[in-house]
């Protein structure tokens, strides 16, 4: 608690994807901060890279041994929370979050079980469910950034393989621009609201891009 009162901590959070890349795993947290649908992940330890942190966290949470090279950086965000788990809880905490993605194999998916002490529920959902649903803006931004990154990768591949196919490359560039624009958060109070009856806790979420 004393450290959190003085320091901003770094977190590596993961978008875990199904083998076909079409669905992602969300966990509904029991604890602060963000007692609602969220990423798997946690604090980065001193001396770790974000991917090494994810390797440790996914080993701790799911018992999976993952090569750090499999993790792909998606986006970065700053998160200021009004509450935290460590006392005094009402002092809150601020995180610098790095989001990475990982496509799991089928055998890895079958081993994934979230800790019931930390998570009340889990679900595999399509990205559109998050983007169109009532989820935290930070989660929406990360999912939107993932889709934009995929399109950027597709455009780069097309430019490398078919540099003279300007029509295809331009089409992909427009699609990337559309995805990137769509995931940009809007400043101000979000329509999403944290509601955690089991903690007797509710709060608004305010987005700032500055």
Image: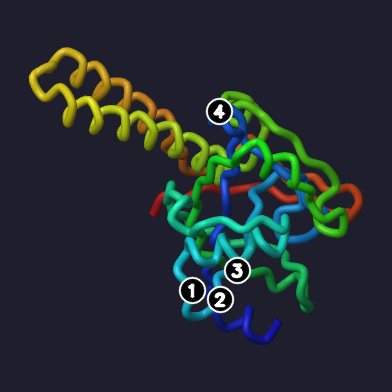
Residue situated furthest left in the rendering: 164
Q: Is residue 144 above or below residue 5?
A: above
- Quadrant, the C terminus: bottom left
Query: Can you tell which mark lies on residue 20?
Result: 4
- Measure the C-alpha gap from mark 1 to mark 2: 6 Å
Disc 1 + disc 2, Cβ < 8 Å: yes
Residue for point 67% across, 44% down = 108
Other-residue count near label 1 (Cα within 10 Å), few / some / many at <14 / 14–19 / ≥20: few
Between 148 and 204, the one lying in front of the other is: 148
Q: Is residue 192 visible?
A: no
Callout 1: helix, strand or loop? loop
Q: Which residue is mark 2?
A: 45
Q: Which mark is residue 43?
A: 3
Measured as percent of width and height from the top left, residue 170 is found at 19, 19
- Tag 2–tag 3 contact (CB < 8 Å): yes
131, 154: nearer the viewer: 154
The tag earlier along the polypeptide, 4 or 2, is 4
């Amino acid at each position: 608690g004393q450290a959190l009162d003085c320091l901003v901590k770094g977190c590596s959070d993961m978008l875990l994807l199904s083998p076909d890349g079409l669905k992602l795993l969300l966990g509904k947290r029991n604890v602060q901060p963000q007692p609602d649908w969220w990423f798997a992940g946690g604090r980065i330890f001193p001396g770790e890279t974000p991917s090494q942190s994810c390797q440790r966290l996914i080993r701790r949470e799911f018992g999976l041994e993952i090569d750090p090279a499999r993790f792909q950086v998606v986006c970065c965000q700053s998160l200021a929370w009004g509450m935290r788990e460590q006392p005094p809880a009402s002092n809150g905490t601020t995180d610098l979050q790095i989001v990475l993605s990982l496509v799991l194999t089928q055998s890895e998916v079958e081993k994934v079980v979230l800790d019931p002490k930390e998570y009340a529920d889990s679900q595999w959902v399509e990205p559109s469910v998050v983007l169109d649903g009532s989820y935290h803006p930070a989660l929406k931004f990360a999912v939107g950034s993932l889709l934009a990154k995929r399109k950027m990768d597709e455009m780069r591949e097309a430019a490398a393989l078919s540099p003279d196919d300007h029509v295809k490359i331009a089409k992909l560039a427009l699609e990337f621009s559309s995805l990137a624009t769509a995931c940009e958060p809007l400043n101000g109070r979000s329509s999403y609201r944290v509601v955690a009856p089991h903690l007797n806790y509710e709060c608004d979420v305010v987005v700032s891009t500055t």
